[in-house]
Image: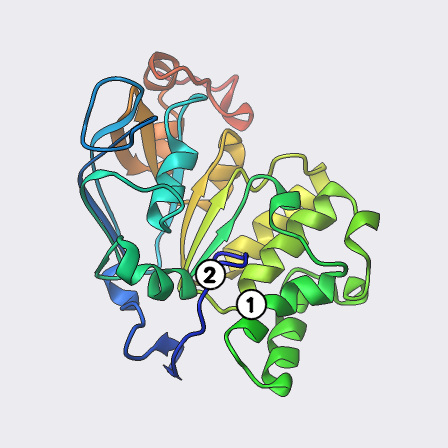
Amino acid sequence: MVHGKDREPGHGKKNGITEEKGIKEENGITAEHLCFSYPTGYGCGKENRVLEDVHFHVANGESVGLIGANGVGKSTLLKLLVGLADGYGGALRVGGLDVEKKNLAAIRKSTGYVFQDSDSQLFLSTVYEDVAFGPRNYGYSGEEVERRVSEALKRVHMEELRDRQIYRMSGGQKKLASLATILSMEPQLMLLDEPSAALDPRNRRNLIRILNDISVTKVIASHDLDFILDTCERTLLLFDGKIVKDGKTEEILGDRKLLEESGLELPLSLKGQNRK
C-alpha cells in the first residue's frame, strides 16, 4: 500500500489475500533483464543508466537487504516495484502480476512502501488520521478501521501517541508512525527505503525488533549495513547498475574486499575481526 492519494478502492478479501484483482502472495518478486535509465526511462539506453540487466527473485516470507553505494539505484528499484517510476525494460513481476498500469492498484493494495523521508508519507494532522487513511480509503467499516489502527499502533508501540499532532513528533516517532500507516493495511510485501535513517540508537533497536516480528516478505534498502545484518538473512549488492552479489547476508557483509570494490565498508560490528 502506497500511502498517498493515488490509491483506488479495492475488492473483497479472503484469508488476507485480495480476490479478483489481488496479488498472489506466494509468487513473490521477480526481475528479469531489468533495466532503467533517466531521464527517458525507456529501454536500456546507456545514457543516465541506473539499472542494467538486473536479475533476482524474492520468495514469499524472505527478508532481503538491498545495499550499494550512493546512486546505484536502490531507491529507484523500490519505486519500480510499485510503479512510482515507469518505463523500465525487461520483466518485473510482483505477486505474479506484471508491474504495469493495469495492475498497479492490486499491487499497491498488498504492498507497503515506507519512504526514506517520513514527511513525504505523513500528510494529515494526527497519527490516528494518517494511520486510518489507508483502511478508510479502501472502504473498510469504522469498526474495522479502528481495529487496524489500534493493532498497527500497538505493533510499533505508539498507542499513547495516537492523537499526537504530526508536527510535534520527533524524527524517530515519525518513522514509526510511517511504518504504522503501512501495517494498518496488513500488507503481504513491505518495501523500506533507509528505514534507520535519522533514528537514535533506542528507536533503531526498537525498529529492528518490530521488523523481525513482522512475518511478511520484506525488501530493505539501506546504507546502514549493521541494520541489514540484524534484519535480513539474504542480501543483494548493487554496483554499477547490476547485482554483483546475491547471497547470505553474513557472507556478503563479511567480505571486506567485495564491499570495498563496491564502494562500501565492513559493518561496524564486524570491523576489527579477521575478515578477508
Q: Classify the position of the C terminus by image quarter.
A: top left
- Percent coordinates x, y for residue 1 in the rendering: 46, 61
Q: Is residue 205 left or right of residue 51?
A: right
Residue drawn at x 34%, y 26% is 39
- Under mark 2, the amino acid is Met
Neighbor class of circle 1 (other Cα within 10 Å; few <14, some 14-19, many 20+) is many
Q: From the image, tell me which residue sits under label 2.
A: 1
Kindly state the secondary structure of the residue where label 2 is placed: loop
- Can I make out residue 243 in this image? no
Q: Name above or below for residue 131 compared with residue 140.
A: above
Instruction: Tell me how far mark 1 sits from mark 2, CA to CA.
Output: 8 Å
Tell me whether the residue at label 1 lies in contact with that at label 2, contact meaning CB atoms closer than 8 angstroms.
Answer: yes
Q: Quadrant of residue 91?
A: top left
Q: From the image, tell me which residue sits under label 1.
A: 134
Q: Is residue 112 left or right of residue 134?
A: left
Q: Name above or below for residue 61 compared with residue 58.
A: below
Q: Name above or below for residue 155 compared with residue 71.
A: below
Q: Is residue 19 left or right of residue 16?
A: left
Q: Quadrant of residue 14?
A: bottom left
Asked whether 234 or 94 is in front, the reply is 94
Q: Name above or below for residue 14 compared with residue 189.
A: below
